[in-house]
Image (cartoon, rainbow, N blue to C red):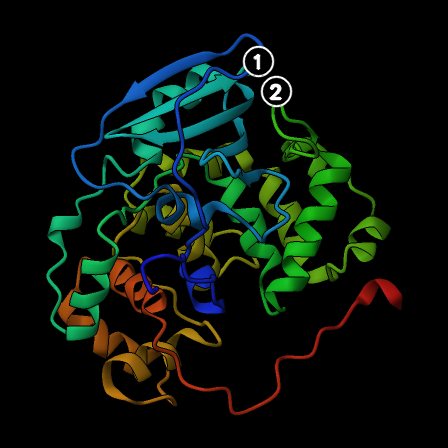
Amino acid sequence: MAGRFAPRPTRTTVRGGHVAVGAGVPRQAAGPGRVRDWVPDGPLDLGLVLGPLRRGPADPTFRAMPDGSVWRASRTPVGPGTLRVCAYGGGVRGEAWGPGAGWLLERLPELLGAADDPSAFVPRHRLLAMTRHRRPGLRLTRSGLVLESLIPSILEQKVTTDEAYRAWRLLVRKYGEPAPGPAPGRMYVMPAPRTWALIPSWEWHRAGVDNKRASTILRAVRVAARLEEAVGMEPGAARARLEVVPGIGPWTSAETVQRSHGAADEVTVGDLHLPGIVGWALAGDRDADDSVMLELLEPYAGQRHRAARLILLSGRVPGRRAPKMPRWDIGQF
């Protein structure tokens, strides 16, 4: 019976970056589009690889379909584009539409973890060895786009994930543009930097975004071109450039480069839950802080982010001892 049904996603698997993706078949979607086939050099799980790019189950820029395909709407350096990715047999097919189609297909292998080296990770704990064995298709994505990971990460500062996902959904749907090509309904490309800068203050308020986070996004989009240049830097240097912008700290920069650069060693510090989860999984210490977490992850230097993802995907988390963080909808004030 255990092999007949896929497990339901838990808070931990979703947090660890996993979306349910069924078995797919290659197809040509309606409308003119460009196509690229690519064969990975090892196991590949689309749900695990692309899952971290989804910001909530109703993310208007991301859709996992019953036919096994994953759709993404992105604002590339050459314009908006829609990408459909489907794994079949031992290969992957990418189909793209819009001005950014060529850019998306050119970087399809990196998006699916071609630049990542899973063999560099050597598990030193039984839990991580077992989790890696159960998740052979885990690779770290490299989107090559900074702003599309930075803005939702800023929205996630100091609030619950539900609040951040709601804000992202409302703002992208209202100020973004419909995804090019035959994308599923209600898919949108995130707004251009100029459009983010012109969002009225009351619309931030209605979306539940306080002035501090809104101001940080406005400062970031004013230097969007300089921030996007960081994709060509090493992760550490890219983080340093991001953190020059007031309001962007170590937590936000790490969450960004993990997605934009596929940074295997950039572990998130300053998180409310992660230190306790890592401490509990590796040492039975649910009260671990950042310093303890970093000490426990030290044996995985160079692969600390991958180790943290495997811990999150393992399902080994301490039981809740206190009520959830309260949700405050400032749009009601």
From mark 1 to mark 2, how far is it between C-alphas?
6 Å
Q: What residue type is labelled 1?
A: Ala
Mark found first going from the N terminus, 1 or 2: 1
Label 1 crowd (10 A; few <14 / some 14-19 / many >=20)? few
- Which residue lies under the disc numbered 1? 30
On screen, residue 3 versus residue 101, left or right, reads left
**Label 1 vs label 2, nearer the camera:** 1
Above or below residue 259? Residue 175 is above
Say left or right for 26 vs 116: right
Q: Is mark 1 on a helix, strand or loop?
A: loop
Q: Residue 331 versus residue 219: which sits nearer the camera? A: 331
Is residue 100 in view from this perspective?
A: no
Q: In which quarter of the image is residue 234?
A: top left
Mark 1 and mark 2 in contact? Answer it, CB < 8 Å.
yes
What residue is disc 2 on?
182
* Residue at x 30% of width, y 78% of height: 293
Taking 20 as reference, is 92 left or right?
left
The percent position of residue 210, horizontal first and vertical second, equals 74, 62
The residue nearer to you, when weighing 83 against 171, is: 83
Compared with 48, 148 (above or below) is above
Q: Where is residue 154 in the image (x, y as percent from the top left)?
A: 58, 55
Q: Residue at x 37, y 41 (%)?
A: 46
